[in-house]
Amino acid sequence: MARSSGKRSREKAKRKQNKKRSKQKSSARFRTGVAAELVDHLLKVFVQTVRTGLDLVVSQPSQRAREVLKKHPLWVLSSEMNSLSVTWAAFMAWDKPWEEFCRMVLADAEWQGLLSVSDRATLEERRARLDEVIPGVIALAVHDALKAGDKQDSRPEADKKPVRAEFDRSIGVAQVIKLLKKRIRAILKRLDQADRQRQTHRPRAYLSRSFLLADLMRWLLHLPSTGALIRHLEEWGHLAGAVNFTSGEIPDKSTFSRRRRLLPIDDLMAILHTLVQVLVKLGVIDGRAWVIDLTRIPTYSSIKKGYPDRPNHKSDPHAEFCGYRDNDDALQLGYSLVFLIDFRSELPFACLFANGSAHDAPLAKPLLRQGCDEHPDLARRCLYAIADGNYDTIDFFTFVLHQLQAIPVATKNTRNAADPDADLATDTLALLRRPGPLHRALFNCHSAIERTNSRSKLTFNLKYHKHRGWEAVLRCCLLSSIAMLAAALAAIETGHPDKVRKAWTWIRVR
């Protein structure tokens, strides 16, 4: 009896504590931490996105919109329904009583223009029909507005390159390397100059640029190892010529390994930065919606075999356990890579390398700051920053709101709170109610980065590389990202923008 009464008393005390915590969390109010002027500006940006997307769904629906509308033939799309849907989106975004919402709209000429209203009677007519609005159409509108122009060359006709018909079905990797060399000519010249400065008693037999371009060729062809690359260079003479090797005089694996380590990481970062700038000028990378997420990169090291002389007892002294299991049901050993991608093109424009046990949240602010510093033009265009629940932190919301002047979108992370429905501290900085149909419509864009992570690991072979060590795996990550951008550049340069994300089926040996 004494034991059962003690158990009941502990449960009662626990319930009181949970109730107290719930009250403390509920004290945080929705959107109270954002200035009223900023809220008004950003909600206008969101409503304008919905309005633009609804017009596109009616006039030029995307492939996804056509597929969804085919499954739902009863969804009504017209200019009248578009006006009603825009009003519904504005009302739901403001999250205010109807009377206050009407006063706000009629007192602001910009809101009247966005909603296409001029009097109270029109608003009341729409209020009677708000139940007819379908949230799924709003989600389609957001998608189409942010994807507008994807897989298209939006440059003026005078600036477009002529379509290369011979590359309609496939393109040789040597041609991709040739197009890439034109864009990074300054960096290649700097590598040649560094080679001349390192010369002592005799000139080097191989140039550093050859090893850099050969490694890029390896990632473009998703080859698993340096040995496979050497076999391709020996078998195909045009591949050796494309990277400035002499046919029949291909260096061995040890030379590749030694010379690869001499290539500065800063030069790889410079190439990545240069390609991003080129793709921004070509209109491929848009920058209106940024998506951020972390992925784990395995290292080429045995999980079971031990090395007593290493700090972590593994063959890769810098790798850490990533917290998830591989196909052999053993904990994965490796590193972390955080991508910052453009939603429309699904291409990375900034990345951050970290240890395998790193958590997402502390890496978000440094990566966002890196993206702003390296690409200020993209920072000025940014309207939305989208992330999953791991980034539901004050730092993420504050940086996006005040530095990017954009709408932060992150799912609510209760972190084992006593009341999962209670307000969190980040709710005071959230522009859209979470959970809700408008927040869900924006968060659906997060799936883009999952596809980018998949392409980096499978198409560009980042999952099956044969390297170990911090610097070696970092080089693999940078080369994989550069190869992804180079494939997109080749697609635009040859007049095939529909091939921007089809490197696996488009790029061939010859």
Image (cartoon, rainbow, N blue to C red):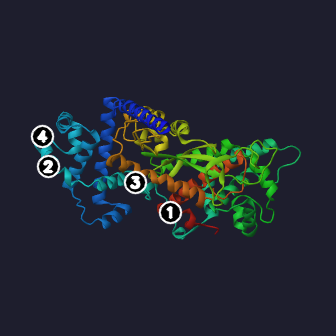
What residue did someone put label 2 on? 128
Q: Is residue 106 shown above or below 489?
A: above
**Labels 3 and 1: the sequence-earlier one:** 3
Quarter-wise, where is residue 79 in the image? bottom left
Q: How far across and how far down the image is residue 224, in percent? A: 69, 61
Q: Residue furthest left?
A: 121
Q: In the rendering, which numbered label is found on residue 499?
A: 1
Question: In the rendered image, which residue does mark 4 sit on?
Answer: 120
Q: Which circle's residue, 4 or 2, is located before the other in the chain?
A: 4
Secondary structure of the residue carrying tag 4 is helix
Labels 3 and 2: the sequence-earlier one: 2
Of marks 4 and 1, which one's residue comes earlier in the chain?
Answer: 4
Residue 302, quarter of picture = bottom right
Q: x, y (%) of residue 42?
A: 34, 38
Location of mark 3 (residue) = 147
For discs 3 and 1, the disc positioned in front in the rendered view: 3
